[in-house]
Image (cartoon, rainbow, N blue to C red):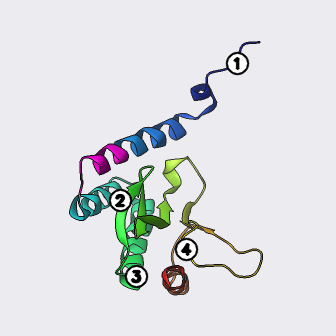
């Protein structure tokens, strides 16, 4: 029985994200520093469509203000924020995978545990002052 190639099971957007990740790994191996990583994140944000760009730029500022120990770095072509080499949180713009909304998410190193079940990702259509306060609190908790 013939099987399909794995690459045929991925969307064009998923394939692009994997290629971006491969480039990120190459950049890491050649010793890219924090400044280069931070610039790559800002360049990625600047290249987003306006609505996503506004949200991403604001989240970028909120994350770094709430937890200055986090380092901005790309992760599968998305702005992400690392502590001790581990991805704590990330922003996925709506255009990345042709979604209806952008997403702000957390990975395993984030200390958000709350019982047996808790949210690790939040859909975002726009940011209000209350949303910004919630993001700030979540980031602070994530790195605590």
Q: Is residue 28 magenta?
A: yes
Mark 4 or 2, closer to the camera: 4
Q: Secondary structure at mark 2?
A: helix
- Badge 2: residue crowd in 10 Å (few <14, some 14–19, many ≥20): many
Mark before the other along the chain sequence, 4 or 1: 1
Cα gap from disc 2 to disc 3, whole angstroms: 19 Å
Cα gap from disc 3 to disc 4, whole angstroms: 12 Å
Cα gap from disc 1 to disc 3, whole angstroms: 47 Å
Where is mark 3, residue-wise? Answer: 67
Mark before the other along the chain sequence, 3 or 4: 3
Does 53 sit left or right of 136 as displayed? left
Image: 113 above or below 23? below
Where is mark 2, residue-wise? Answer: 45
Quadrant of image for the N terminus: top right
Where is mark 4, residue-wise? Answer: 110
- On the image, the x and y values in percent for residue 10 come to 59, 34
Q: Secondary structure at mark 4?
A: loop
| Residue depicted at x 35% and y 42% | 23
Q: Which mark is residue 3?
A: 1
| Residue depicted at x 25% and y 60% | 39
Cα gap from disc 4 to disc 2, whole angstroms: 23 Å
Q: Which residues are magenta?
A: 24-32
Q: Secondary structure at mark 3?
A: loop
- On the image, the x and y values in percent for residue 78 come to 43, 55
Mark before the other along the chain sequence, 2 or 3: 2
Mark before the other along the chain sequence, 1 or 2: 1
Q: Nearer the viewer, residue 67 or 104?
A: 67
């Amino acid at each position: 029985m013939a099987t399909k190639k794995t690459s045929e099971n991925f969307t064009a957007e998923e394939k692009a994200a994997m290629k971006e990740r491969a480039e990120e790994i190459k950049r890491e191996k050649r010793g890219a520093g924090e400044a280069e990583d931070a610039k790559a994140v800002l360049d990625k944000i600047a290249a987003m469509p306006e609505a996503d760009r506004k949200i991403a730029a604001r989240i970028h500022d909120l994350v770094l203000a709430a937890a200055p120990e986090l380092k901005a770095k790309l992760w599968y072509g998305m702005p992400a924020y690392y502590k001790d080499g581990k991805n704590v949180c990330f922003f996925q713009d709506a255009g990345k995978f042709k979604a209806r909304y952008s997403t702000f998410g957390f990975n395993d190193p984030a200390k958000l545990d709350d019982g047996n079940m808790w949210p690790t990702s939040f859909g975002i259509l726009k940011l209000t002052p209350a949303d910004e306060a919630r993001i700030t609190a979540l980031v602070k908790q994530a790195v605590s």
